[in-house]
Every structure is written in structure tokens, then in C-alpha cells.
């Protein structure tokens, strides 16, 4: 009799059991607005001249947003090329059905990796004659041309041919019959600095070097080669940086890298970081909260325990420095952020319950918290905040 009653209460045959049964919104998750990406790309493209192409940079899983999703909406918004950092990222995009040209921005230096790149129709970035030779041999072997971009170093001292020696090397590279030079590019190191339009700034010096190089090699006859230099900051600085293509990451995701705001640009953040309240407790005055007892309550305090921590990618050094939004109200995070959880002071709130959703990044009502805010208080940059989010956080498209 007892057992029959239990079975009526819980139909165990139909009870969820598997990983797939877990509601992805029961703990912490990232919501991505595809439409925001699309609108941002469209808006940014309106700043380019008609023939200038837009490469959507979707490295590091689309700055933490999900590269496949970002690519889809960036292409809808008019991106005609995609940029990734690694071979694996490129292959993943190709196998998801992306048809657009994909440039690998990192360096492939083994024959094996270059063959894999070739066979997946990905363009490598080439910084030396040695790599050109390997690519030419691969092309020759398959009886085809290997499409690639050449990179020159104009002041970043990272990848790229040495600027002064490039013109000479370029003559040699042009004679390789089985490679097709699709682009020549360089990368700006300091375009997001406030002084970057001053004539003597690092950015202007890089620009001068790049233009001198182009004069040496380009104006002769190499019409089909795309010249590109600008990242988000370079693109937003002014048109001189655009050339034939811009490589845009951060601003496509909705954040301007420039400290000066452009009134004609209203970028929309595509990422929302949300979390559930997993537990609520009330503590007396003078009670320690979290590891190291760094926070001690100064009054009777109502605490919400949120199920998100540094193992999800919320930097621990944000402890006690951020707010969380619920119903258009900001609540301060208190005590050390732990691996999987953090506490928030919700004293006075009557509308927050176990299972309530709080917003860590994004907006709710007229309150907004941006990765730029987190970056400022944790002494880093928004790029690092965005690509710190771990796979433990599901990415869910909302539109
Ligand atoms: C990451 C990257 C970009 C995009 O930079 P943002 O500042 O995010 O726009 C452009 N070019 C190269 C080579 C990169 O590595």
C-alpha cells in the first residue's frame, strides 16, 4: 500500500535521468543575441566604403559567444570573411557548413598542419619564406594553388615578415607557382590608446611603415591582393586604416575599444551572463562570509548564494568589486568569489527567491553591467573577460 502510493506521487519511469534532461537554465548560463551581432556588423559596415570587406573575427569560440552562432549572424549582417586563431577553430567552422573564406590568424609552422589547413580550405597566415616553400610544395603535390595571406610586422613584434626586408622577399614569393597570395596584412599594437591619432603615436608610425611598404610592392600590379590592417580600434579611428578589408572582433560583439564614444554608433552587447539564486540565508551582524573571511557583515544581512564562480570564468579578483542585477536593482557581491559559487547582499529585497534569475553581465531594466566595467575593476581588458568563460556555462541563443 505504502509503495503504491509513492509510485502514484512519483512516476519514476518518466522521471528525468540523463544529462540531456538537465534544464540548462537551472544554474548559470550565457545568453547570446544573434540579432545584436547582425545589427552591429551592419552598423559597422555602414562606416566602410562599398568595396571594403568585413572580416568577422570569431577566434576563441567567438570571444566566448559560440563561434558558430556568431559566424551565422555576422554573415547575415554582411561579413564576407571569417578570422580564427587556430587550425582547430577553422576546421570546426568549416564542418559547421561555413562557406566564406576563413583566415587563420595564428601561425602554422608544420607541414602536417599546413596540409590539414589546405585540405579544409583554410587560409594560413604566413610569416616566412620557409613557410611559403612548404605551402608551395603542398600546392604542387595536389596540383592546385594554396591560398594564403602574408603578414608583415610593422611594430607589434609578433608574427610577420620583417618590414624592411619584405619587398625583396615578396619578389621571390610571387614566383612560387602553387601559392596564391590572397592578402597582405599587418596588425596594430596600440590603436585603442587615446593618443593614436597623434602624428607621432605608435599607431601612426605603424601606419607609415605599412604605407611605405605598400608603395614599394603594391602599387605596381598586384591588384587581387587584399590589403588589411585594422582591428576594431583601427577601424573606428578613421577610414585611412580600412584598405580592402577590416578584421573586427570586439566591436562586433557590442563593445567599443575606444575611450572616446562615437555618438553615431550604438553597438548592442550580444552577451548576457545569468545565474540562478541557489540558496538564501540570513546572517547576523559580525558574521564572516566566504573564504578568508574577507567580508564581515556590518548588520543583519540577507545573502543570496549564486551558483557561479571562478571555475565558470568569473575572475576571482572581482571579489567584492561587482554588482549583480535583479528587477532593475543592483546588489553588491560580497566575500571571496569561490570556485563554483558567490554570495550577494540582497538585504531589503523581498522579490528575490530561490530560483530567481540574476544578471551578472548585460542589462535588466535601465541597469547595465558590461565586461568593460569588470575589466576596469580587475585591471584587465574586456577581451580577456569575454574569452575567460568556460564550457561549463552553456551558451544559449535568445532572439
Ligand atoms: C584578434 C584580432 C583582431 C580583432 O581584434 P579586435 O580588437 O577584437 O577587433 C584583428 N586582427 C588580428 C590579427 C587579431 O589577432
Image (tube, rainbow, N blue to C red):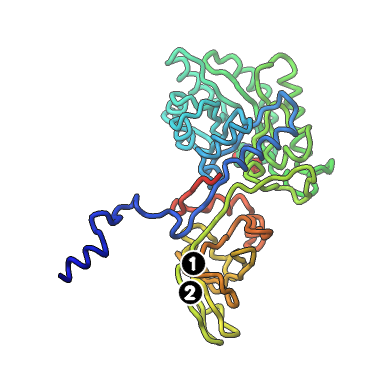
- Taking depth in this image into account, of 358 and 127 the one nearest to the observer is 358
Residue 161 visible here: no
Neighbour tally class for label 2: few under 14, some 14-19, many 20 plus, Cα within 10 Å: some
Report whether 15 appears left or right of 60: left
- Numbered mark located on residue 280 in the image: 2
Query: How many numbered discs, if any?
Result: 2
Q: Which of the 4 quarters of the picture holds residue 209?
A: top right
Where does the image place residue 2, in percent across and percent down from the top left? 17, 71
Q: Are marks 1 and 2 in contact (CB under 8 Å)?
A: yes
Q: Which mark is residue 353?
A: none
Q: Residue at x 53, y 58 (%)?
A: 274
Q: Secondary structure at mark 1?
A: strand
Q: Is residue 364 left or right of residue 113?
A: right
**Viewer can see residue 48:** yes
Q: Position of residue 301 (x, y in %)?
A: 56, 81
> In terms of depth relative to the viewer, which is nearer, 317 or 162?
317
Q: Is residue 195 left or right of residue 35?
A: right
Please identify the quarter of the rendering in which residue 63 is found.
Answer: top right
Dot 2 lies on which element? strand
Mark 2 close to ligand 1, CB under 8 Å: no
Image quadrant holding the N terminus, namely bottom left
Amino acid at each position: 500500500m505504502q509503495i503504491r502510493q509513492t509510485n502514484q506521487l512519483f512516476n519514476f519511469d518518466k522521471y528525468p535521468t540523463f544529462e540531456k534532461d538537465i534544464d540548462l537554465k537551472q544554474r548559470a548560463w550565457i545568453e547570446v543575441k544573434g540579432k545584436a551581432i547582425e545589427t552591429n556588423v551592419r552598423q559597422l559596415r555602414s562606416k566602410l566604403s562599398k568595396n571594403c570587406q568585413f572580416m568577422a573575427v570569431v577566434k576563441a569560440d567567438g570571444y566566448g559567444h559560440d563561434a558558430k552562432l556568431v559566424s551565422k549572424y555576422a554573415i547575415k549582417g554582411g561579413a564576407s570573411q571569417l578570422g580564427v586563431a587556430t587550425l582547430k577553430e577553422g576546421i570546426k567552422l568549416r564542418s559547421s557548413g561555413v562557406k566564406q573564406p576563413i583566415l587563420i590568424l595564428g601561425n602554422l609552422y608544420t607541414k602536417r598542419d599546413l596540409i590539414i589547413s589546405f585540405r579544409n580550405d583554410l587560409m594560413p597566415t604566413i610569416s616566412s619564406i620557409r613557410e611559403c616553400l612548404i605551402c608551395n610544395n603542398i600546392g604542387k603535390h595536389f596540383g592546385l594553388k594554396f591560398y594564403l595571406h602574408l603578414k608583415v610586422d610593422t611594430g607589434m613584434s609578433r608574427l610577420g615578415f620583417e618590414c624592411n626586408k619584405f619587398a625583396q622577399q615578396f619578389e621571390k614569393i610571387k614566383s612560387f607557382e602553387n601559392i596564391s597570395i590572397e592578402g597582405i596584412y599587418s596588425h596594430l599594437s596600440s590603436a585603442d590608446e587615446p593618443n593614436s591619432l597623434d602624428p607621432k603615436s605608435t599607431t601612426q608610425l605603424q601606419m607609415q611603415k605599412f604605407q611605405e611598404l605598400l608603395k614599394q610592392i603594391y602599387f605596381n600590379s598586384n591588384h587581387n591582393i587584399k590589403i588589411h590592417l585594422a582591428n576594431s580600434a583601427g577601424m573606428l579611428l578613421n577610414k585611412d586604416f580600412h584598405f580592402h578589408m577590416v578584421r573586427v572582433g570586439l566591436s562586433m560583439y557590442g563593445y567599443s575599444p575606444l575611450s572616446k564614444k562615437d555618438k553615431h554608433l550604438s553597438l548592442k552587447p550580444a552577451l548576457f551572463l545569468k545565474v540562478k539564486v541557489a540558496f538564501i540565508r540570513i546572517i547576523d551582524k559580525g558574521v564572516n562570509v566566504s573564504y578568508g573571511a574577507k567580508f564581515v557583515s556590518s548588520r543583519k544581512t540577507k545573502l543570496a548564494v549564486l551558483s557561479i564562480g571562478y571555475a565558470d570564468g568569473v575572475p576571482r579578483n572581482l571579489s567584492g568589486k561587482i554588482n549583480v542585477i535583479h528587477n532593475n536593482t543592483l546588489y553588491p557581491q560580497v566575500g571571496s568569489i569561490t570556485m563554483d559559487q558567490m554570495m550577494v547582499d540582497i538585504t531589503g529585497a523581498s522579490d528575490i527567491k530561490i530560483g530567481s534569475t540574476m544578471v551578472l553581465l548585460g542589462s535588466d531594466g535601465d541597469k547595465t553591467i558590461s565586461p568593460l566595467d569588470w575589466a576596469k575593476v580587475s585591471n584587465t581588458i574586456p577581451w580577456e573577460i569575454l574569452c575567460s568563460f568556460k564550457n561549463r556555462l552553456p551558451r544559449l541563443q535568445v532572439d
